[in-house]
């Protein structure tokens, strides 16, 4: 009888451990909501990459003045000191050339920055899009809430069909993902994949939909902007790789220096 009790107890411990393992939540990187006005609506999203810098979409750089950094139950309100976009944002097409930018915080954050990954994204890879999705309305006064949805990287041919642009996939920085439905306020939000038990950032949202109805969206791959991003990392990653230049690339646009 005593042996039976011990066996049942051991079984219960094993089952509890298995349930605990299944319930483990993988920590997400610090998500940043970006504002033009301190008390205004959420305009864009970004991700904290060092205590001083936020990575976001290039189109979010010029007008962003305030950042709210959220990680678990921690919230920080920080003013933006300056910003720099990697390349000129295309105004005549839905796509961008190297559509990333960096924002310099006036005060350093106390939260643990996200980890970045510059590997090539292959079709079928499972990823997670994070942001502050909200459908467009005249009343955007409600506070943003962190949203997360999973999806998969899709082939470039499918991306061309959906975007309506035959050259969409030819842009080196672009990758399309099916599943997530990014919308108003999600531009610049991080896309992550799980590596060694933690989320690492591999891309940023650059296509959004005001009605939140598009099931396939475009994202800027970090792997093509490594040369731009890496100098802001502390310490810089090893084995740097130069950014491949896309065909018909536009000349860089002057931006405020990060000093």
Image (cartoon, helix red, strand yellow):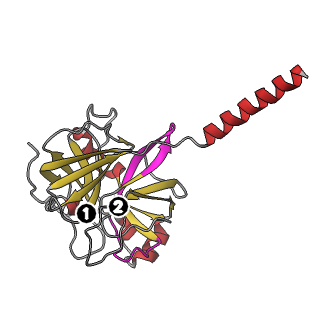
| Location of residue 113 in the rendering, given as x and y in whole percent from the top left corner | 32, 39
Outermost residue toward the right? 1
Residue 132 shows which numbered tag? 2
Is 16 left or right of 221, judged from the image as shown?
right
Can residue 228 be seen by looking at this rendering?
A: no
The residue at 29%/66% (across/down) is: 142
The answer to which image quadrant residue 226 occupies is top left
Q: Secondary structure at mark 2?
A: loop
* Callout 1 touching callout 2 (CB < 8 Å): yes
The answer to which image quadrant residue 245 occupies is bottom left
Can residue 52 be seen by looking at this rendering?
A: yes
Residues 116 and 66: in front is 66
| Location of residue 125 in the rendering, given as x and y in whole percent from the top left corner | 53, 54
Range covered by the magenta-colored residues: 192-215
Is 196 left or right of 13, judged from the image as shown?
left
Question: Is residue 234 within the magenta segment?
Answer: no
The residue at 42%/57% (across/down) is: 129
Residues 202 and 215: in front is 215
Is 79 left or right of 179, judged from the image as shown?
left
**In the depicted structure, whether residue 181 falls above or below residue 211:** above
Which residue position is annotated with label 1?
Answer: 42
Mark 1 and mark 2 lie on one chain; the one further toward the N terminus is: 1
């Amino acid at each position: 009888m005593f042996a039976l009790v011990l066996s049942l107890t051991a079984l219960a411990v094993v089952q509890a451990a298995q349930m605990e393992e299944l319930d483990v939540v993988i920590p997400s990187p610090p998500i940043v909501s970006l504002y033009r006005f301190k008390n205004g609506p959420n305009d864009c999203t970004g991700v904290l990459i060092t205590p001083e810098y936020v990575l976001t979409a290039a189109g979010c750089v010029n007008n962003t003045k305030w950042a709210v950094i959220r990680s678990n139950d921690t919230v920080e309100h920080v003013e933006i000191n300056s910003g720099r976009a990697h390349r000129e944002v295309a105004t005549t097409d839905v796509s961008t050339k190297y559509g990333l930018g960096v924002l310099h915080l006036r005060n350093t954050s106390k939260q643990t920055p996200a980890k970045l990954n510059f590997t090539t994204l292959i079709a079928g890879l499972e990823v997670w899009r994070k942001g502050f999705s909200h459908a467009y309305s005249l009343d955007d006064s409600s506070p943003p809430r962190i949203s997360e949805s999973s999806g998969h990287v899709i082939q470039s041919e499918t991306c061309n069909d959906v975007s309506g642009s035959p050259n969409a996939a030819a842009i080196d920085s672009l990758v399309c993902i099916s599943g997530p439905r990014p919308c108003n306020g999600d531009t610049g939000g991080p896309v992550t994949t799980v590596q060694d038990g933690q989320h690492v950032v591999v891309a940023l949202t650059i296509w959004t939909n005001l009605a939140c109805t598009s099931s396939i969206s475009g994202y800027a791959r970090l792997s093509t902007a490594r040369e731009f991003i890496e100098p802001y990392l502390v310490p810089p990653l090893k084995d740097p790789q130069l950014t491949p230049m896309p065909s018909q690339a536009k000349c860089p646009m002057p931006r405020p220096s990060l000093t």
